[in-house]
Image (cartoon, rainbow, N blue to C red):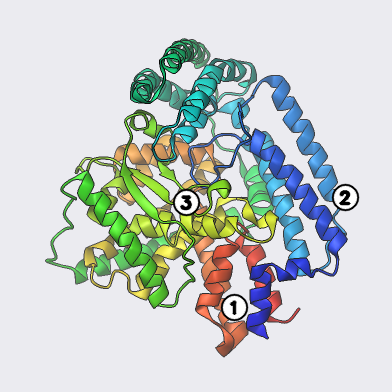
Amino acid sequence: MLKRAISLAVGGAALLAAPNAAAQAEVQQLGAQFWAWRAATQPATSDDIPRIVRPAQWTPDWSPAAVAAQQARLAAFEAEWKALAARPQTVSEKVDYRLVGSALSRVRWEFDHVAAWRRQPHFYVAQALNPIFEVLLPPPPLERARIDDVIRLLGNAPAILSAGKANLTDMRGPFVDAARHQIADVPASLDGMVAGMNPHATAAQRRQLATAKARALAAFADFDAYLAAKRPGVSDTTAVGRDSYRYFLGSVALYPYSPEELLVMGRQEWARSVLFEELERNRNAGVPELPIGSSIDTVIAQLDADELKVRDFLREKNLLTVPDWAGHYNAQPFPAYLAPIGWLGRTFDLTSQARVGQNATVYLPDPSSKLGYFNLSITRDPRPIIVHEGVPGHFFQLTLGWKHPNPLRRHYYDSGANEGTGFYAEEMMLQAGLWADAPKTREIIYNFARLRALRVEVDVKLALGEFSIAEAADYLEQMVPMDRATAEEEAVFFAASPGQAISYQIGKMQTAEFLAEARVREGKAFDLKRFHDYLWQNGNVPIALQKEEYLAMVSGK
């Protein structure tokens, strides 16, 4: 009976049989309306998990009028949500209701607390260029329809930058500096992108690309001059502050922890990961370092072969159901049109709700000892990145979540569950024996863990104003250790997106606690594979809510 109850919930029958069907329908309708609106208004981001399917011919609009319209619609959604507070009755209904609340709180967090649209000039660099990056991210061939999308979006860049000048009423100095650093790379990036696209374009499209590029570059030069003039006297404070951070923890991510508790948790896990890494290094004394792949073709072939072996391992160890319809996580070298703008975001095409079943793609640079922290690890052994980003990590978890029978659970809310699951997958595979014959890769996994634990301290201290961006970069460079460029990139990203960096470690720790309590509650009836199937399919749902629902099911409530 226990297995049947959980399988029904995972399969959707519990949703269909809900005793309070009218209330559930109201919450579902509100959620559907919200996500349709969010698809048209969600800010573009460099991150891979939050990417969303946009409406056809979508063009971002951050004009003051559009921002005011977004704020008014958000307030209306919030009022509708609050009016439904007494309607949900069952645990699953309450979980769905709180999911909509979490999603609304995320938008409120973006508008009123992080306020990137008012404080972060590089936000407008992202809104101008990241939509183009996302159009070019799916693998070749580069169809003419996609080129038309690039032409339209590139043509919209001047309007986005003009909106930035109108909206940036509370700029912060380090974010001005970050934006100007990015803008310095824009001319060469757009030149390279257009040159790479031209062989795939018609003569008319080539002319349109050239015109749109010239106008965009002029707009970026004007925006840079505007920022340079405004930089003197701008506040250097980037912290959102304790009250806002507490709002994020409690209302968006649904973490049951204070900032001080997060610091203790992160520090304990950092010490644990350092211990395990040093024990592993001592155990591996005399073992040669992993060689760097001899060529890009060699690394790609290794990654594609290892992905199949990882899937087989999951099946053989009875860890997780791997349906045949789920696409694969494969590698490609950068297309000529994508490489110049690769710095705009995570170069992983994880597909989308509209492309479930297709293969995901990770684009890889030529192997070199000069590569950054993560790309260097891929050239030595692709399996850590496969496990975190591909299978069983983000791509596989999103693939399963996008087919959830409950539409509300198909959407990303916040990184805690998704990144927590990706990080949990690394340790799950380590302890299950995937790297039993790869001692040097085990060192990589423990060093990854060391980084994820340090991110907690960096995130909290940046949010509370106890670290500047420069201090955070120094800390990451020294304590992981990692290359300076990656450390600076991470520090700026985490300062601009408070709450994201804690998601890996805190999400994993919540998952471990969830599993332990489920194991104790179920006793001998506990089934690890069944637990993982539930966790992965509901992987867009905050762990606290997953735990509440799962434990209610196993208790027969």
Q: Residue at x 72, y 70 (%)?
A: 13
Q: Alpha-carbon distance for marks 2 and 3?
A: 40 Å
- Left or right of 91, for residue 281: left
Residue 227 in the image: x percent, y percent?
Answer: 50, 16
Note whether residue 268 is visible: no
Residue of label 1: 518
Q: Residue at x 54, y 40 (%)?
A: 497
Q: Residue at x 44, y 40 (%)?
A: 138
Whether the residues at callouts 1 and 3 have beta carbons within 8 Å, the answer is no
Residue of label 3: 358
Residue type pointed to by label 1? Ala
Instruction: Decide which of 369, 318 is in the foreground and name it.
Output: 318
Q: Which mark is residue 310?
A: none
Residue type pointed to by label 2? Ala
Residue of label 2: 83
Q: Alpha-carbon distance for marks 1 and 3?
A: 33 Å
- Left or right of 342, for residue 420: right
